[in-house]
Amino acid sequence: MPFATVYPLVSTRSLARPFTYDVPESVAKGAVVAVRLGRSATRGVVSDVGVEAPPGIVPVAAGKLLDEIPAPLVDLALWLADYYGSTPARAFELVAPRRRSPRGERPSPASRESFGGEPEPSALTPGQQAAVERIVAALDEGVGEHILLDGPTGSGKTEVYLQACATALARGLGTIVLVPEIGLAPQTVGRFRNRFGDQVAILHSSLGDAERRDERDRIARGEARIVVGARSAVFAPMRGVGLIVVDEEHDTAYKQESDPRYDARTVAAKRAALEGAVAVYGSATPRPESWARLRRSSLPARIGAPMPRVGLVDLRREAGYPLSAPLLEALGVLVEDGGRAILMLNRRGVAPAVHCRACGVSRRCTDCDVALTLHADHALHCHHCGRSEQVPRECPECGSVELARIGAGTQRLETELERRMPELERFRLDADVSGRGGAVRDVLERFGSADRAVLVGTQMVAKGHHLPGVALAAVVDADTGLSLPDFRAEERTFQLVTQLAGRSGRDAPGRVLVQTFQPDATPLRHAVNHDVAGFLAGELERREVLGYPPFRHLVSILVAGPEPGAPLAALRELRGRLDADDAVLLGPAPVLRLRGRHRAQLIAKTTQPRALARRASALLAAAARTMRRDGLTAVVDVDPQSL
């Protein structure tokens, strides 16, 4: 029997290395086998065969074959573990999840979770034709190409994806289509199923275990050559991948916030390189990183309608927040003439804070350094830890009954619309609503069929939904993200406003209103003119001076503990021993307390993120016993999307 290198799927970092086992000659790279590790039985992934045993070691025999994954996924998992400072076992769990035994036949969830699609157009625009030809040429080269497909909303990016996918299928190659959130999957699945039928599979975390297993089996058997899903779909067990589409590539939801903290956009690029596939990144508002690094194919204009007029409402000169007079006037036109509006306010609840007018104290979460948000259930909720309490009748600090509700959230906006515009049917889409199964699809379908209606929501209403008959889109408060202490704050504000503007006027004349106290802010000035290139040019110039991505990578090291001083002390010691000549180190500095734990953060700007993360992880592992004694936990995050 030949020997094979096998990675046991165990979480213990001290065992995060390969072992040598005897395997049958039929076993190849990518096999998932049962193995013994000491007294324990577990699964293991074969990463190499035909190896020699280490000196003095007599390998034991591996057990039965449990599953198989394509060989490129083995290399992808090992790269992911190394780049993001995770363990091979945790990375392999992404590409080779535990497989449950099948229990009968089920229909594909893709048929259930899909909207209707549009017919194929009779002809492509010149921009679309050029983009398709470029992708096809890259497919035929088979060397792993990365292309940015940019253009305003409604310029036909999805049709380019569909045409490229058809070409890949004709060449015997498969396609993976990534969307940033599960709520966007039904629309994309519907478009691809309309064109390619049962060849389309869907993968995301909201599917049941049996449905996920069935879809993975269809993909592995080659029955489904197109996979649509959220970030985890990048690990689909498809053989012969020719095309990977990353739609709405600017969206931060592609970043996983638990170990392994991978970015699906970066993983897609790596998988494309391993498979010789083409990766296409599409967005109306690309990231500065993509704009600077990728070859571009541009769709210059919206198809069938001009971009809507965008007007700024200066809230310094308008009363009536959250519904200013210009916004009420625009809504009144819908009451008279019919039509639909989307109003975005990127805060949930009734009010983001309850404040005492007498002593100035706001009600805050006792476990987190954040204000409690008032919701329609007359309770105050923490959006971080989930803690809630009833609204007090009087201030617990001074006894005053003068408690004021500060600001507005989506629930208050919905109430204000009911009071001021009762003729308009109201729908709300935020995290309080979307958590219910099928809620996103239900809300969007009912809104799309209404005659006079308003859809109120957080940023999810600005994402890639194609909603017919939207005559008005409004950003109720464009300033909510501008004041965040994050170098991406202006980028995200520009993206949010521009993306929402793109929901209006796609099949009829449209109008966009942006309410703000900062009408001269850089992202708003560019968004008013739909000036993507101008905004990105200025943003890249600023980032180059400051050494932010794409000119340097970021690595965040976050330590949390029960006492306020311990995380800072641990990071100061780590900084002193990090030996990072290439890096610019910022901090450590305290960050807000969450779930009762005090936190501190050290940020590194570096051109060698893997080496720095590896060094930091090794130092933290060496101090693991002391950190456990002190109740400290540490997270190393490569390319973090929020600071």
Image (cartoon, rainbow, N blue to C red):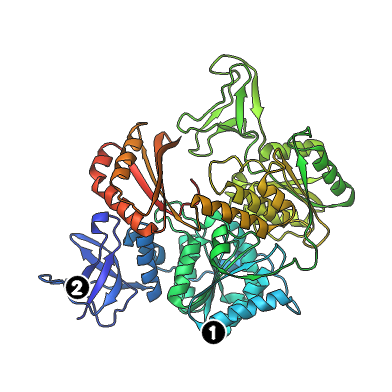
Tally of numbered discs: 2
Q: Residues within 10 Å of mark 1 (few under 14, many from 20)?
A: some
**In which image quadrant can residue 166 be found?**
bottom right
The residue pinned by badge 1 equals 140
**In which image quadrant can residue 281 be found?**
bottom right
Gap between marks 1 and 2, in whole Å? 43 Å
In the picture shown, does residue 262 fall above or below 142?
above
Compared across the picture, whether 256 is left or right of 112 comes to left
Name which residue lies at 36% across and 61% down. 81
Quadrant where the N terminus is found in the figure: bottom left
Picture disc at residue 310: none
The foreground one among 18 and 456 is 18
- Please tell me which of labels 1 and 2 falls first in the chain: 2
Compared across the picture, whether 208 is left or right of 565 comes to right
Name which residue lies at 34% across and 58% down. 611
Residue 412 horizontal/vertical position (percent): 69, 36
